[in-house]
Every structure is written in C-alpha cells, then in structure tokens.
C-alpha cells in the first residue's frame, strides 16, 4: 500500500500508543512501521502525560507540531484511557490529536459514548491490522487538517497584528460593505484618508478586494469583529 500522503510542510506524522501490554505496543509499532509510520509507545497514562507535560511546557511550540493521533487502550491499571481522553478533551487537544480507542467487547457502549463526545473512533479487540491502520491514517489526515487550520489562524493573527488601530477600524467598515464616503463620515476623516488606509489594509492582508478580505477571515475561522477586538 502507498505511504500516507500528507503535506510535508506539516512535519512527520507520529502515532502515540498508550497500552499497558508491551506485546500490544510492540505489535502495533511493527504494524505502523510496515506502513512507514513512526510511533511512540507508553505503558500507562501517567507516562504519556509526563511526556505531554514536557512537550507543552511554556516556551515550547504549540503541540502537536506535526500530524498525530493517539491509539489508546480504554481500560488499564491506574488511570484509565477514558480519563485521559476526558482530560485531553477538556484541554481542547482532540482536533489536533484524534483518539482511537482499543476496547474489549464489554466496553463498546462506553466507547460509542466517547465517540459521541469527540473521540475519532474505537476498534474492538481482537482487531484487523489493516482496518486499524487505515483508521489511524484517516485520523492523521484529520489531525493534518486541524494543524493546517491552526497555522492559518496563526498567520492571520500575525497579519492583523501588523494593522494599526485606524486600519482595523477601516477594515471593519469595509467588510461591513460601507462605501468610502460613509466610512469617512463614520470615522470623521477624509475620503482620501480612507482610500489610503483601505489600500494599506489590502496590501498588508495580501488581498485585492473586500470580498477576498472577508473570505480570508472567514476561512481562517475568525470573524472580522472578533479578530479586531481587544486591540
């Protein structure tokens, strides 16, 4: 089967395996290597969270830094996989780190409920190797999409940070559909000044029209008002 195709600029994908059975972790790691996927195994939730604490320490880049997913045993000694899932959900990490549960037959109803709360999927033991890796690859694609969206939001935030307060005010009124004359009246400035600010906004944001500007903000998941609030 062809290797998973992801945008190389997003980095090398990683699959995190959290299962207290070493034989399961080793088998999954071998299976993933056969699909040219890197993995990192943890024998407990505590071990994974210790690694997570290092990766998310202040000053570190936003984590995960590349497409990732978590293959998580639902029931383990100590802290359960379900508890870890709930913690990740509370921290807002599920979009970039989709969770696939490994579960026994008796835990299927709980796994179904977890999927409804945001888990990517669950796979019942004993599982089909190919079916599991197929779902892992789909989870990595979902993670890549979430990381791309996060990157877009970050790029938009940088562009908006370069606008002056007045340029933000003009931008908002442009997006609202007001002509230059009404913008000038609203801000008590001349039409020529509006034209200058409008041109600078378009240049800094890399757009050629108000429609493109509105689409840029919409596609990046931010409304113009929310993007300019608090400046």
Image (cartoon, grey):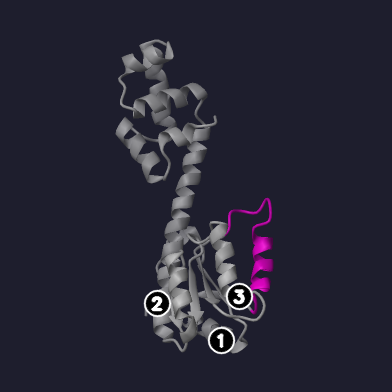
Q: Quadrant of the C terminus?
A: top right
188 within the magenta span: no
Q: Which residues are magenta?
A: 43-63
Residue 223 visible, this angle: yes
Q: Quadrant of the N terminus?
A: bottom left
| Residue at 64 percent of width and 79 percent of height | 43
Say if mark 1 contacts mark 3, CB within 8 Å. Answer: no
Secondary element under disc 2, as helix, strand or loop, is helix
Secondary element under disc 3, as helix, strand or loop, is loop
User: 206 or 225, which lies in front?
Assistant: 225
| 1 or 3: mark nearer the eye | 3
Say if mark 2 contacts mark 3, CB within 8 Å. Answer: no
Q: Quadrant of residue 85?
A: bottom right
> Mark 2 highlights which residue?
134
Measuring from the top left, give residue 40's x and y in whole percent: 59, 75
Q: Residues within 10 Å of mark 2 (few under 14, many from 20)?
A: some
| Residue at 65 percent of width and 61 percent of height | 55
> Mark 3 highlights which residue?
80
| 2 or 3: mark nearer the eye | 3
> Mark 1 highlights which residue?
24
Relative vertical location of residue 85 with respect to residue 123 in this rendering, above or below = above
Going from the N terminus, do you reach mark 2 or mark 3 first? 3
């Amino acid at each position: 089967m062809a290797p998973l195709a992801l945008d190389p600029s997003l980095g090398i994908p990683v699959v995190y395996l959290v299962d207290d059975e070493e034989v399961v972790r080793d088998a999954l790691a071998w299976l993933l290597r056969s699909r040219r996927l890197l993995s990192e195994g943890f024998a407990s939730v505590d071990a994974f969270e210790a690694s997570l604490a290092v990766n998310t320490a202040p000053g570190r880049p936003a984590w995960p830094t590349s497409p990732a997913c978590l293959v998580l045993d639902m029931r383990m000694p100590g802290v359960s996989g379900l508890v870890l899932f709930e913690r990740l959900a509370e921290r807002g990490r599920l979009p970039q780190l989709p969770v696939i549960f490994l579960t026994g037959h008796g835990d299927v109803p709980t796994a179904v409920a977890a999927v409804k709360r945001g888990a990517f999927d669950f796979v019942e033991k004993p599982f089909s190797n190919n079916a599991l890796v197929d779902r892992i690859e789909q989870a990595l694609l979902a993670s890549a999409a979430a990381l791309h969206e996060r990157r877009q939001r970050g790029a938009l935030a940088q562009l908006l940070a370069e606008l002056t307060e007045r340029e933000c005010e003009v931008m908002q009124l442009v997006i609202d559909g007001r002509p230059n004359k009404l913008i000038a009246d609203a801000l008590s400035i001349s039409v020529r000044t509006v034209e200058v600010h409008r041109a600078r906004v378009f240049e800094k944001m890399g757009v050629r029209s108000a429609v493109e500007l509105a689409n840029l903000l919409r596609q990046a998941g931010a409304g113009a008002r929310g993007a300019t609030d608090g400046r």
